[in-house]
Image (spheres, grey):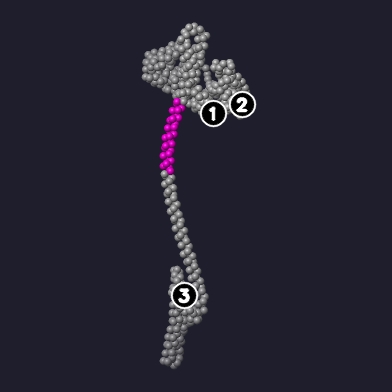
Amino acid sequence: MGQMRFSLGKAKWYTQLIIAYALMTIIPLLTFGYFLTAYLIPNFVTHENLIIVIVCNLVLSFTGFSVLAKTVKTLARFRGYIENVAKGDLSKQILLRDGPEVTSITQSIGTIVETLKQDRARLETFSRNLEKEVAKRTEELHRDIEERKKTEQALRESNMMLSDALSELKEMQHRLLQEERMSALGQMASSVAHDFNNALMPIVGLTEFLLMNRDMLNDKEELLSTLEDIHTSADHAKQAIVRLREFYNTDKNPDLRVVDVNEVLEKTIIACMIDMQKARGANKAIDVRREFGEVPFVNADEGELREALRNVIINSIEAMADGGLLTFRSYFENKWVVMEVIDTGIGMSPDVSARCLEPFFSTKGDHGTGIGLSVVHGIIRRHKGNLVVHSEPEKGTSVKILLPVVRVAGGRTATSSGGTGELGPLRLLVVDDDISSRKLLSRYLVAAGHTVETAETGAEGIAMFERDRFDLVITDRAMPDMSGDVVAASIGESGKMVPVIMLTGFGEIMKDKGEVPKGVAMVLSKPISLKELKDAISEVVMGARAASQAGQ
């Protein structure tokens, strides 16, 4: 390690500076004193005195300049050392060999240097640790980035796999949905075939029996009884279509009226008991108990409500093959009007009871359709009500129909439009490609006192309408050459103001959808009874006449 050596002498450094400056100050004073003496005392100044003054001046000057130069040099070296320390060079030492401040300055500067060295060592250690920590964190960050990249790659691959799986799932779901639809259509077709076969059996059998035994036509009572049975079977076939429509059409708004549930219960019980007595012998009788309470009126579609009760009662009757007790209750509970049907039949297990409202689920095997309770559920749901089923095996089943109470007086009710007596004989045109429908409608209308013309095709019907005058046109919809929509539109555009009734097998579906083709005044559904047809004709013709009078 290099060393810088200098000495201030034994005297203090500021004492030596004072002496140096004093010596340098004495020189001009001696010179000034010599010349003043020479001026005042000329005889005193000699050549020897001048030489003495000059020598003294030189000695004093040399001595002062020497002391000053040494001090300045020492200060310069000290300054250089301090500058080196300030620049961070702590490798050199300063040595003070003389003077009273040697120990103090050496210790102070040494302490400062040692402190600086320690600080530098700590800084170097901190720097190394910091570099290690930075390197460690950098490495961890690189690892995190790599792991994140791997995770992102894995997520992308997983996303692609999920996307492929979702596509496969959607495709599989679509296939399953198609299979379920086909299965449902098959079950629905089987159910419809079952109901129709049951309805057609007495129709075909009784008509064949009459045709084979024509002598029985003379027995009016037997003939009327047979015709009533045929009509009942035909009505059952019609109701099968209604039940099927109720199954798929769960969003139709019911025709609400003010209804007394006790009256509806009584009417339905009587109708079902008649059918039950026909199907059972006296040894398998079913006892009926009525426990009707005093309940408020409800707003309901009476026809739909009776249909729902009829399905429940039929299920209860079929569950009591060996007879039993059938209890009907009505009561008011928690703002609900409750109609309850309780049987003592075979009951259902919890698993079967949990599925009894599912479409096409039946406990009767091939003998059941599985749409009875699902129809009931759809009807009650449209009435904003609830259906509660409780059953125990070998003990029986309880079915509760809960309807909300609407505390509003009045409701939408039907108005009777009267018979055709007020209208008088009408001239009617029937357009239908089915010959059986044309003959039946002609018989209905002629029996009601009207004049009827029939057309087999839509084009023939339009031609007849243009040639002649008619008060009303009744047309089918689905015909091979021209649809009923075109026929109605052509008649509406003729300007003759003749109303059109569309009577079609798609009538109920069109009503549910609110579909009324252009030029059609009313849509009716096949099959139709004579009373329904007469009421519809009266309503349409009277409405057309009222509109004509208002226009005049």
Q: Earlier in the sequence, mark 1 or mark 2?
A: 2
Which x, y percent locates residue 187?
Answer: 46, 25
Q: In this picture, which residue range is highlighted in magenta?
A: 158-186
Which x, y percent locates residue 405?
Answer: 58, 27
Pointer 3 residue: 94
Pointer 1 residue: 352
The question of residue 278 being in magenta is answered with no
Query: Magenta region's main secondary structure?
Result: helix
SS state under label 2: strand
SS state under label 1: helix
- Residue 326 is labelled as none
Residue 64: tell me if it is visible. yes
The residue drawn where x is 46% and y is 18% is: 527
Q: Amino acid at mark 2?
A: Phe
Q: Is residue 179 above or below residue 82?
A: above
- Discs 1/3, front: 1
Outermost residue on the bottom side: it is: 43
Which x, y percent locates residue 509?
Answer: 46, 23
SS state under label 3: strand
Q: Tell me if mark 2 has few (under 14), some (14-19) or many (20+) residues whose alpha carbon lies within 10 angstroms of its own.
A: some
Q: Tell me if mark 3 has few (under 14), some (14-19) or many (20+) residues whose alpha carbon lies within 10 angstroms of its own.
A: some
Q: CA distance from mark 3 to mark 2?
A: 115 Å
Q: Amino acid at mark 1?
A: Val
Q: Quadrant of the N terminus?
A: bottom left
- Residue 332 is labelled as 2
Q: Quadrant of the C terminus?
A: top left
Q: Earlier in the sequence, mark 1 or mark 3?
A: 3
